[in-house]
Amino acid sequence: MGISQTQALDMLRSDDLLGIGREADAVRRRLHPGDVVTYQIDRNINYTNFCTEYCSFCAFYRPMGSPEGYIQPLDSIFQKIDETLALSGTGVLMQGGLHPGLKIDYYEDLLSSIKRRYPQLHLHCFSAPEVLNIAEVSGLSLRDTIARLMDAGLDSIPGGGAEILDDEVRQRIARLKCTTDEWLAVHRTAHGLGLRTTATMMFGCGETLAHRVNHFARVRQLQEETGGFTAFIPWVFQRANTSLGNFIKEEATAIDYLKTLAVSRLYLDNILNVQASWLTPGFKICQIALRFGGNDVGSILIEENVVRAAGVTRTSNEEQLRHLIRNAGFRPVKRDTLYRTYFLN
């Protein structure tokens, strides 16, 4: 068992940043002996930006009927996949808004069309709110929805839509979005069907430190129950172009990011991988985060539109990520979506 909720809260309140970092680094070294840090080559593809949830932290969505809204045609998605494979990519992360007119047959056709053309491609698709929306508009149970998506080619589910897993926060920042229990139900059901998923956390959106610990606790509890999470991925709320950004008085700092990452590594010692981010905090902080519990730097992100809409313009490529990892004192190893590191190079 990792640290307790009380210990986690005390650490988040503590000024002993380096001490917390050393403890988290010890857990990383225990779970990942040696000097390997992993990365991935994949692409985020947004099949639609139409959405009915109106989350206050999102600058990406467009309301139904907006002239700026779109549903990607298959040919466009195929072109993006071709570009990904040309860069030695192994998968795509496909997400979109919650579209009230797209039923299960649209998603089955989308997945099966991709799988027929690219059988080797790993399809890491559809956040928990999307899965719940598909089930609702299709009149299906959650289990039947996920099972049909799997039959059509779905390989794993990303952790998007978690934000903070505490309904007090969710009611304030995403009133129409799924509840904590609903988000957990999607992942529990997926795990029960043999589908691996990731867990994420978006913090710095006006939540308390206790809310963050509640998030850790819910994720750890489900992992103890199912063992289905491959990784935990915390990242910082980006305020530009969002309505919520106008109400956040204090932004999360680099110190806040490092401390939260380290405490997540200590609390979630039943999840093998914790991802350090370069996209939102930057490359230098990402390197430091590899000594604060992170063992992975995520994807080169050939394409990323959601965080970009909130003002983040940072990009990378494989050479940059390998350089970042080496300069932090580690050996870069390419992985796939399920963290299988048979791409030693």
Image (tube, grey):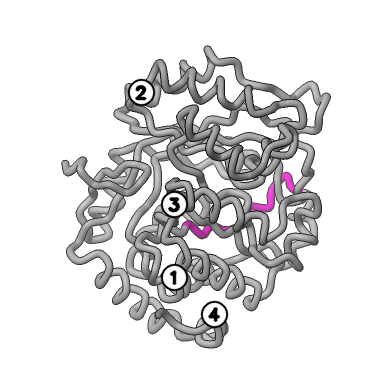
> For the residue marked with disc 4, what is the amino acid?
Leu
Q: Is residue 171 left or right of residue 240?
A: right
Q: Position of residue 123 (x, y in %)?
A: 44, 33
Visible residue check, residue 256: yes
Q: Nearer the viewer, residue 94 or 328?
A: 94
- Residue 82 placement, left or right of 183: left
Name the amino acid, label 3.
Trp
Q: Find out whether the residues at labels 2 and 3 contact each other: C-beta distance under 8 Å.
A: no
The residue located at (58%, 75%) in the rendering is 213
Residue to which mark 4 is pinned: 12
Q: Residue at x 41, y 53 (%)?
A: 283
Answer above or below: position of 133 versus 171: above
> What residue sits right under mark 2 in the picture?
119
| Pick the front one: 83 or 109 | 109
Nearer to us of marks 1 and 3 is: 1
Measured in 3D between alpha carbons, the distance from the residue under mark 1 to the one under mark 2, in whole angstroms, is 34 Å
Q: Amino acid at mark 2?
A: Pro
Q: Nearer the viewer, mark 2 or mark 4?
A: 2
| Residue type marked 1 | Leu
Residue named by callout 3: 278
Magenta stretch in the rendered image: 233-242
Between marks 1 and 2 in the image, the one whose residue lies nearer the viewer: 2
